[in-house]
Image (cartoon, rainbow, N blue to C red):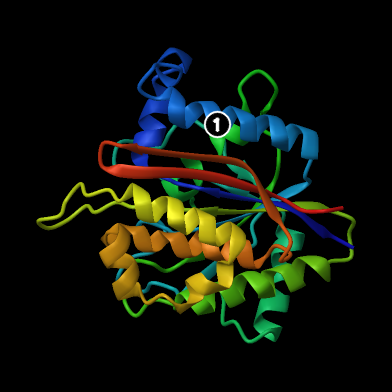
Amino acid sequence: MARVVGGIGASHAPSMEHIYDAGEEVRESEEWQPLFGPFKDVATWLEELRPDRLVVIYNDHMDQFYLDAYPTFALGVAAEYPVADEGFGARPFPPLPGDAKLGWHVARSLVADEFDITICQELEVDHGVISPLPMVDFSEGEGGWKIPIVPLAVNVILHPLPSPLRCWKLGQALRRAILSYEEDLRVVVVGTGGLSHQLTGPKFGRVTPEWDQEFMRLLAEDPESLTRYTYEELIKLGGTESVEVVNWLAMRGALPRDARPLVQAYYAHRIMGYGLQTFEVAA
């Protein structure tokens, strides 16, 4: 039987890609070390944990999906996932390896659990996946990507959005799907997005560190309290684009209640509240 052995919540942003691609010297600079340094700790933790698969809960930024047909939840069931071209050419990474068998199992389980999933046999992943993952799962000198993924996209773009409670329940259903898989796999669930950022209007660039850190505290100690927030409240607290935090909430829903944070980091910089939080699961 498969097991959920850990969880990761991480911000995603094009800025993370630009700094990563600029090289290690830039990543280790005084400006960016507060963000990229903790990702090294997560990479070390993953190496020690040795998961067999990553289920990555993220949101697409109109690279695979568009406003004419935007699914509420979409699941990848492919053998590999190419990197999307977000307007400046695709980043020079090989396609991410997938696990079609596990993906189909999760799809069947979620549908049986009354989640109407869009099933994607072809899926390009954008910075929702490809901005945090290279820092914890890619080695240029050791064959590239190390851990196959199953991507699960959540709509936080086109209203009506699935409620925070619905995303929490999605995580719980995902946990049931993983635990019912017959192969002995160790799975880490990843939720990417947020934290506070506002990319439009008169409050452009507003960051709210106090709320970001309170969100991370609640996610660890009382995650179900976050299911009672409305999107209007989340937008007022963290900005329009901060609604991506429901991906973290879905990740937390896939973990046992007694999961506890291990690596935690927060960095409010420029127009973004960057967060990073890993959860360890008792054996």
Residue 17 image offset from top left, x and y in percent? 40, 34
Q: Residue at x 31, y 58 (%)?
A: 238
* Residue farthest to the left, as pictured: 202
Amino acid at pointer 1: Pro
Residue 149 image offset from top left, x and y in percent? 66, 50
Q: Residue at x 48, y 16 (%)?
A: 24
The image shows residue 112, relative to residue 176, as above or below, that is below
Q: Residue at x 43, y 46 (%)?
A: 12
Q: Nearer the viewer, residue 11 or 56?
A: 11
- In this rendering, would 166 be left or right of 221? left
Q: Quadrant of residue 169?
A: bottom right
Can residue 85 be spotted in the picture? Answer: no
Residue 82 image offset from top left, x and y in percent? 52, 45
Identify the image quadrant of the N terminus: bottom right
Q: Nearer the viewer, residue 219 or 193?
A: 219
Q: What residue is pinned by disc 1?
A: 38
Residue 191 image offset from top left, x and y in percent? 55, 55
Q: Residue at x 75, y 73 (%)?
A: 176
The image shows residue 39, relative to residue 235, as above or below, that is above
Can residue 72 be spotted in the picture? Answer: yes
Q: Secondary structure at mark 1?
A: helix
